[in-house]
Amino acid sequence: MILQVGGVGICGSDIGMLEGPHRHPALPGVIFGHEFAGKIVEIGPEVKNLKVGQKVAVDQNPGCGKCYMCRNGFSNGCLRLFDNPLAPEKGWPYTPGQWWDGGLARYVRLPAHYCYEIDNSVPMTHVAVFEPLGVVVNAMNKVRPQVGEICVVMGGGPVGLFATALLKAGGASKIIASEIRPKRRELLKKCGADIVIDPKESDLTQIVMDNSKGFGAQVIIEATGSQLPAALDAVSFGGRIAQIGIPSATIDFKPFQIYVKEVQIIGVFLMKHAMNDTIRILGSNLLPLDTIITHVLPLEKVNEGIEIARQGEGGKIIITPNEL
Ligand SMILES: [Zn+2]
Ligand SMILES: [Zn+2]
């Protein structure tokens, strides 16, 4: 089908692709944009569940629903999706905006099973955060924060901001967040974090212990990719850590802490089965999305948007190729 694109999120992985092939590989010359949403303008005769004029959210990494992995509940490991002839090594799904032309354009062509119907009343800028928000919803569904628990969010990029807002909405008694950039610390506060620290200036573990009578945090959202050792220091007995930041390096940590505190470390990869929950959240007023989306720019200003994202000077940055 063909979509008229209404909103495209700039993602940390876009920055990684621009920085070179090692952090995040991509096919040179491809049109960027993997987090996008739009309106259907043309549809194939075999598509029965969607119609022209419909607003849709896009899952850029859908499972085929038929392979061994999909049939065993791991659509995020879909064999067809990961059978990517262009990737330098296994582990890179065949994602638009990375290996084939994505959404940073006025129109984009993509298969119908990438698209989820969403109510036309949801603003396009909100629909554009469907996938990054969905990954955080997937994390919450796994880590299952309970009302009254003490939670830590490491990292104040869009994922950390979504996580903070969801934890707040879910009844966390205290949210302690850490982030090195001042602008993002402000956003974490606005999303509901009670205590926000700069980990270069303050000792996160000490602050968590001071605020939990020395017991630690029950839930930790690791949204940086590099802070698992600090998460293991700050987590409580029986606590859960969601590894949602993309780890890019081999790091030293103390497995003894996992053992002695019976810690659960839970990997979170893509949206998996969080699509319908995420669509319901987007259709509600549960989250301060207009606070998390700090910049909305036209397609002509995409380079400006990428620069803001690179500097960590904003929350989510959305490009609007068409005003829909
Ligand atoms: Zn992304
Ligand atoms: Zn599959």
Image (cartoon, rainbow, N blue to C red):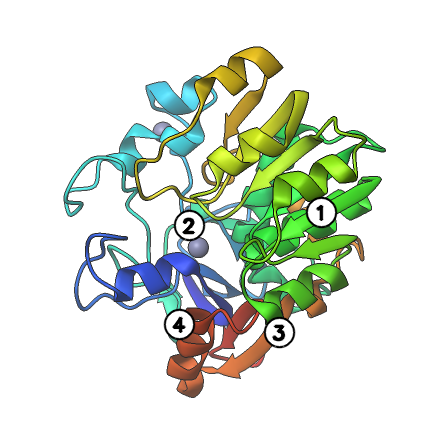
State whether label 1 is within 8 Å of ligand 1.
no
Q: Residue at x 35, y 35 (%)?
A: 251
Which residue bears the numbered disc 3?
Answer: 294
Q: Is residue 162 left or right of residue 97?
A: right
CA separation, marks 3 and 4? 24 Å
How far across and how far down the image is residue 73, in percent?
A: 48, 21
CA separation, marks 4 and 2? 15 Å
Frontmost residue, 253 versus 6: 253
Crowding near pointer 1: few (<14 within 10 Å), some, many (20+)?
Answer: many
Amino acid type at mark 3 = Thr
Quadrant where the N terminus sits is bottom left
Please tell me whether residue 175 is drawn above or below residue 66 in the rendered image. Answer: below
Q: Which callout, 1 or 2, points at the residue further toward the start of the chain?
A: 2
Asked which secondary structure carries label 1, the reply is strand
Q: Nearer the viewer, mark 2 or mark 3?
A: 3
Amino acid type at mark 1 = Ile
Which residue bears the numbered disc 4?
Answer: 107
Which residue bears the numbered disc 2?
Answer: 60
Can residue 186 be seen here? The reply is yes
CA separation, marks 4 and 1? 41 Å
